[in-house]
Amino acid sequence: MSCKYLAHLRRTKFEGIRIPPPEIRSYRDYDLDECRAIARDYTTRTGWFAGDRQSYQAAYTFGWLDDCAKHMTRKHRRRPRNSL
């Protein structure tokens, strides 16, 4: 179960209200066009991963990550040079 759904269950149990559960989608439910559309909203892969993990996981799992992230800028980590 996802964290959103567990939070929903706790909230309805304690408050005694019936609220429809939030939309829960698996990474298997995404297709290539949908992943591309979602990825366009982000400028880096890190931002995409933080913002929408399910679509990122779908792109990673199905091998679409490079295709969906063509427009994104890469963050390169600078490693300190060995001063020896």
Image (cartoon, rainbow, N blue to C red):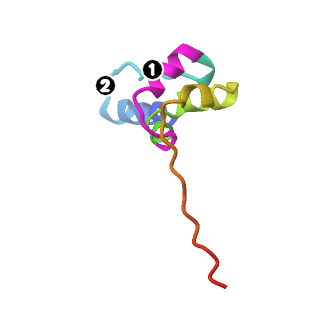
Quadrant where the N terminus sits is: top right
State the image coordinates of residue 29 (x, y, percent, origin top left): 59, 17
Q: Amino acid at mark 1?
A: Glu
State the image coordinates of residue 22 (x, y, percent, origin top left): 41, 23
Residue 21 lies in quadrant:
top left
Cβ atoms at labels 1 and 2 below 8 Å apart: no
Q: Does dot 2 land on a helix, a strand or a loop?
A: loop
Q: In the drawing, what numbered circle is on residue 17?
A: 2
Q: Does dot 1 land on a helix, a strand or a loop?
A: loop
Which residue is at 64% across, 78% downward?
Answer: 82
Classed neighbour count for the residue bearing mark 2: other residues with Cα under 10 Å, few (<14), some (14–19), many (≥20): few
Q: Pointer 1: what residue?
A: 23
- The mark lying in front, picked from 1 and 2, is 1
Q: Which residues are magenta?
A: 32-46
Task: Report the front residue among 62 and 2.
Answer: 62
Q: Secondary structure of the magenta portion, mostly?
A: helix
Which residue is at 58% across, 23% downward?
Answer: 26
Residue 15 lies in quadrant:
top left
State the image coordinates of residue 18 (x, y, percent, origin top left): 34, 21
Task: Report the front residue among 6 and 70.
Answer: 70
Above/below status of 81 relative to 69 = below
Task: Report the front residue among 82 and 34.
Answer: 82
Task: Report the front residue among 78 and 25.
Answer: 78
Residue lying farthest to the bottom in this orientation: 84
Above/below status of 78 relative to 32 = below
Q: In the drawing, what numbered circle is on residue 11?
A: none
Q: Amino acid at mark 2?
A: Ile
